[in-house]
Image: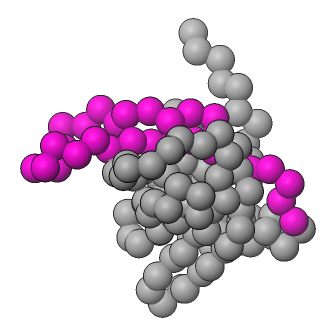
Amino acid sequence: MKVERRRFKRHIVPENGFEVSSRELKINGKLKDISKGGLSYQYTPINGGDSKSEVLDILVEGTDRFFLPGLACNRIYNITELAADRTFTGAEIRISGLEYVGLTEEQTQKIESLIEKVFFKTTNR
């Protein structure tokens, strides 16, 4: 039996424009899930290095525009997504799991607000 080690519930993000930008890696991705302790995002790698830490910005477009800049994170995992819907170019799709580091009170409040404001389905993956 698998034991859940996460301290916070993960919330699956609906596929409606939740963008994540990594400043150091200069990549953009889609937010996959989020919790009060971390998040994961999906992206297509570009030429460049790998990093153990990242600074992320989260942007939600649409009527409920939301911007959360400068989230300092440590990378917990970075894996290839096993998906049947690969792109025609054969480009690899990866998922990066991150843990927040040294959040400010304002960042913590914005994350909690985002989780409460938007309807998410809870997952234990």
Q: Quadrant of the N terminus?
A: top right
Residue 98 appearing in the image: yes
Q: Residue at x 50, y 62 (%)?
A: 26
Residue 20 percent coordinates (x, y): 51, 64
Residue 93 percent coordinates (x, y): 32, 44
Residue lying furthest top in this view? 1
Residue lying furthest right in this view? 105
Q: Is residue 80 magenta?
A: yes
Q: Which residues are magenta?
A: 75-104
Pick the residue in front: 121 or 77: 77
Q: Residue at x 61, y 68 (%)?
A: 57
Residue 117 percent coordinates (x, y): 63, 73
Q: Is residue 26 left or right of residue 45?
A: right
Q: Count every numbered label the image shows and give the total.
A: 0
Q: Residue at x 53, y 41 (%)?
A: 50
Q: Residue at x 44, y 86 (%)?
A: 62
